Image: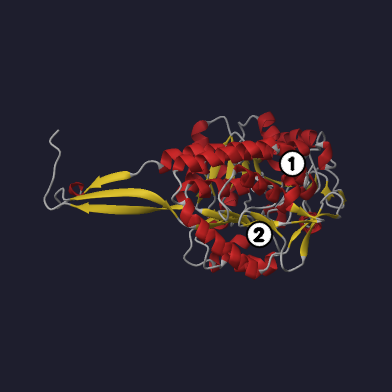
């Protein structure tokens, strides 16, 4: 059960504590932030509303702890990460319970997220030991005009304090994808979890605490974004920001200053379907890519661009599969569960109403109860409809019929997003040409967009982000190069 057993210490009455200096604390504000269960639409949990003064204290603690941690041997850092991963997986049930109640993620998928997170942490420990255990040795005479009088030694050193801000849809996995690389690289971490998902994140942090990491190295502050959001991201004590979420990230990037940024800000992932595609494979991937977790994924299929000659056949196949999707509460492992908030549901409904007014074809009846929206396929979508461009983050999927591959590529590239895309065809040559032409961070061939496996590079262009994620890329991003040059009094060459 959440908040019981080894997790009892993180709960104070009805309010979960925040974490700093190796201790679970109540905020001096005396205030809390309510977390609304998307299914019941009632308050499920409460977390501390931390103050700016408490953020200052957290930053001081993180800076001090990082100095000692940077002197900790790599093998010891890895050892603690492996221990945290094991504890995380051991306690997957209560953490998954939080995900079900906070973000309405289906129960089975919630368990999968926690286990995946443990695997990510372990893999990161191994990868960090390998890549941080190596440096470079350069000699000066490889550059024209120089004798071998200089030896250059390069290594990777930590940045300092990393601020990690994960999104609601993967509050454990995408927190771990920031925490583990930061720690193995010798940084300290300040985690600001999303409000929806904060309690799951606090349970996850408890697992790192139980692993025995030094006090102050990991902190987790909760509170209202309006009160501590900008204060955190603009804090002079922050040396790196890793953010996953929506267009808030654009505002952060404009305010952050001279701080390395890792940003993933959503997408409008296009699925281009050619005449020779395996339509059964396409339909299965559209269902998986467009409707899993009710479409609340940055890498969800967000628009289908299908050649007119096969559009009717594909739409019928997708409609048949949509009819089989189960709709209901996450506790019952339904395929479609409530979206995260009433405001999200209202936004999705607004996109549907706009398309209806402009003559879209409904493949199913639009149906909504509270935050629960039934899966909906919209055919004959035109570029003048909002759904053609905006990210619904819900179980509504537009179909745009195209007359040429070039038309599909043009629509994809006209988007302000550029996270992922996919193309379905039996012709690998066409697939590669289309992949090269699509302005996205990743293109999947004959499969739906996806983040992972977690060691794969993951990045977006345009408004979809800055930098690249994936375990190796995150470790690299959370370090900087340090060089030491040895100057010799005379040229020296090894004779062999």
Residue that badge 1 annotates: 96
Q: Quadrant location of the C terminus?
A: top left
Residue 482 in sight here? yes
Identify the residue at image location x=87%, y=53%.
370
Mark 1 nearby-residue class (10 Å; few <14, some 14–19, many ≥20): many
- Image quadrant in which the N terminus is located: top right
Whether 321 is drawn above or below 476: the answer is: above
**How is the model colour-coded?**
secondary structure
Image spot of residue 361 (x, y percent): 79, 47
Residue 177 position, x and y percent, is 58, 46
Q: Position of residue 331 (x, y in %)?
A: 83, 40
Helix, strand or loop at label 1? It is: helix
Which label number is shown at residue 221?
Answer: 2
Looking at the image, residue 261 sits to the left or right of residue 248; the answer is left
User: Total label count?
Assistant: 2
- In the image, 153 versus 64, the foreground residue is 64
Residue at disc 2, secondary structure: loop
- Image spot of residue 446 (x, y percent): 59, 33
- Label 2 Cα crowd, 10 Å radius (few <14 / some 14-19 / many 20+): many
Q: Quadrant of residue 345?
A: bottom right
């Amino acid at each position: 059960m959440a908040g019981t057993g080894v997790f009892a210490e993180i709960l104070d009455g009805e309010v979960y504590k925040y974490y700093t200096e190796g201790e679970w604390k109540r905020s001096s504000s005396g205030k809390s932030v309510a977390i609304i269960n998307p299914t019941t639409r009632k308050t499920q949990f409460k977390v501390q509303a931390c103050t700016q003064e408490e953020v200052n204290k957290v930053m001081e603690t993180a800076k001090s702890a990082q100095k000692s941690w940077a002197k900790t041997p790599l093998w010891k850092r890895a050892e603690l990460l492996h221990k945290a991963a094991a504890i995380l997986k051991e306690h997957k049930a209560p953490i998954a319970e939080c995900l079900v109640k906070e973000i309405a993620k289906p129960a089975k998928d919630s368990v999968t997220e926690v286990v995946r997170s443990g695997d990510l942490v372990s893999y990161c420990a191994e990868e960090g030991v390998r890549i941080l255990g190596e440096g470079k040795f350069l000699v000066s005479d490889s550059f024209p005009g120089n004798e071998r009088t200089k030896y250059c030694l390069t290594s990777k050193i930590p940045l300092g304090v990393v601020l990690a801000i994960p999104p609601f849809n993967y509050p454990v996995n995408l927190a771990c994808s920031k925490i583990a690389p930061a720690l193995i690289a010798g940084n300290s971490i300040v985690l600001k979890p999303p409000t929806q998902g904060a309690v799951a994140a606090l349970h996850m942090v408890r697992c790192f605490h139980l692993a025995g990491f030094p006090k102050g190295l990991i902190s987790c502050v909760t509170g209202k974004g309006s009160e501590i959001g900008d204060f955190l991201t603009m804090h002079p004590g922050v040396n790196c920001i890793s953010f996953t979420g929506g267009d808030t990230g654009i505002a952060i990037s404009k305010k952050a200053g001279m701080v390395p940024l890792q940003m993933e800000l959503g997408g409008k992932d296009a699925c281009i379907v050619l005449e020779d595609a395996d339509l059964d494979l396409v339909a299965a991937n559209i269902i998986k890519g467009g409707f899993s977790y009710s479409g609340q994924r940055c890498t969800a299929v967000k628009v289908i661009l299908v050649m007119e000659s096969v559009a009717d056949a594909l739409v019928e196949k997708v409609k048949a599969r949509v009819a089989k999707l189960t709709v209901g509460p996450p506790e019952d492992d339904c395929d479609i569960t409530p979206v995260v908030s009433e405001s999200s549901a209202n936004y999705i409904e607004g996109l549907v109403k706009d398309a209806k007014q402009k003559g879209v074809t409904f493949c199913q009846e639009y149906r909504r109860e509270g935050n629960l929206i039934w899966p909906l396929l919209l055919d004959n979508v035109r570029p003048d409809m909002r759904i053609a461009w905006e990210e619904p983050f819900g179980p509504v999927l537009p179909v745009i019929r195209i007359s040429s591959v070039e038309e599909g590529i043009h629509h994809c590239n006209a988007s302000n997003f550029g996270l992922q895309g996919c193309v379905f065809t039996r012709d690998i040559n066409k697939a590669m040409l289309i992949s090269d032409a699509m302005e996205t961070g990743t293109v999947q061939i004959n499969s739906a967009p996806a983040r992972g496996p977690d060691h794969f590079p993951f990045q977006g262009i345009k408004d979809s982000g800055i930098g690249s994620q994936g375990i190796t890329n995150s470790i690299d991003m959370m370090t900087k190069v340090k060089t030491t040059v040895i100057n010799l009094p005379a040229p020296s060459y090894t004779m062999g």
